[in-house]
Image (cartoon, rainbow, N blue to C red):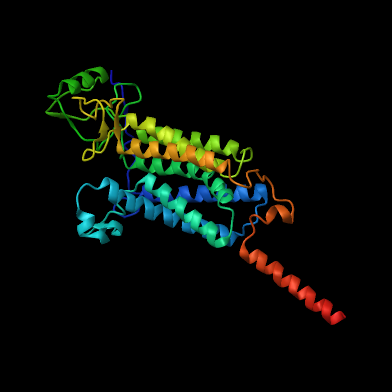
Amino acid sequence: MLLSIPFPSWLKPEIIPGLPFRWYGLMYIVAFGVAFLAYRRQLRERRFPMSEDELSGLFFWGILGLLLGARIFAAIVYETSDIYRRQPWLVFWPFREGSFTGLMGMSYHGGALGGFLAVLIFSRVKRFNFREIADMYCASIPLGYTFGRLGNFINAELYGRVSTGPLGMIFPNATPLSTGEAWVQDAAARTGTALSGAWVNLPRHPSQLYEALFEGLILWAIIWVFRNRKPFRGFLVGLYFAGYGFFRFFIEYFREPDADLGYRIEFVKSGLSPAYTHPPLSFSTGQILSFGMIVFGIAWIIAASRLPGRETIRVYDTAADASAGKSPADEAGKATKRNQRRKLRKKLR
């Protein structure tokens, strides 16, 4: 009896075979659209004084920061060769050997850092309260992130370690394993996989779907519930970073580390292949970065809880409430109207 799920044969990376339009890119567009709509709903719920143009600008710069951070971080942290040092323009060059490949490699942790800095700069320039608009951002992002991981699944990439359980899936492009290894023979016997040659493709954890569920839907649901019940401004930012880091840290145990990176920290060496087991005291690059997110999230919550203006403003009803979030354009418009009224009063005198 085969204890695995075959990868859907009808799922292909290209939307239309032969054309350079991929589901992965479309999933990014859907992700940004979903996050945009979730953010706009929060603005309307709270009657937050941000115009449509300002909202579009916020997302434009946020997405730009995310993409730049994700790509640059991937090139620095995950690329082991010195190709980008010798040819730095290739970091953003979407062609390889004459073929369109898109941007090869994106780091979520780098994207989170780039997006965070972009929203921070935007809030300073437009004079919005950073903790307010960042909280709404963090209540929108995880739902969009779900679609990004679904794009990875459609690409049949970022699959997990070998699984001998009922959730294992045979990915068509997974690295074949030598049938001469004792653990490969054992895993094949436990999953009912026939060994007919020197290499075999064993079932893997669909870790992309694990991440879509926990780092996407579940994390979004938790933050969404707290969006109008947060104890202070900035709380959702810390909750997002700590929550994502927590889920990602443990899901990494089901993922196979990058072959060229392996485990960055190994307190206990294991003679088994990382495709088969992830020792509890061995930590991948993703786990180290996720642990950093947990620390940052907790530190942010502690710091934000002690900053001035800790109270939550749920709905902007009065001019006094809205003043914390008004844009310079709004203030300039009101100042112009006040000056016009003063001039009119002088003429009437």
Quadrant of residue 1 within the rendered picture: top left
Total marks shown come to 0
Confirm whether residue 340 shows in the render: yes
Is 294 displayed left or right of 38 in the figure?
A: left
Viewer-closest of 275 and 131:
131
Quadrant of residue 329 within the rendered picture: bottom right
In the picture, the quarter occupied by the C terminus is bottom right
Q: Residue at x 43, y 57 (%)?
A: 64
As drawn, the residue found furthest toward the right would be 349
Is 41 displayed left or right of 93 in the figure?
A: right
Q: Residue at x 62, y 50 (%)?
A: 43
Q: At which x and y percent is residue 107?
A: 35, 46
Viewer-closest of 347 and 137:
347
Quadrant of residue 289 within the rendered picture: top left
Viewer-closest of 52 and 83:
83
Is 105 displayed left or right of 124 in the figure?
A: left
Q: At which x and y percent is residue 53?
A: 57, 62
Confirm whether residue 16 shows in the render: no
Q: Measured along the vertical axis of the image, is residue 128 above or below residue 211?
A: below
Q: Residue at x 51, y 48 (%)?
A: 35
Is 237 displayed left or right of 339 in the figure?
A: left
Q: At which x and y percent is residue 240?
A: 49, 40
Q: At which x and y percent is residue 162?
A: 27, 27
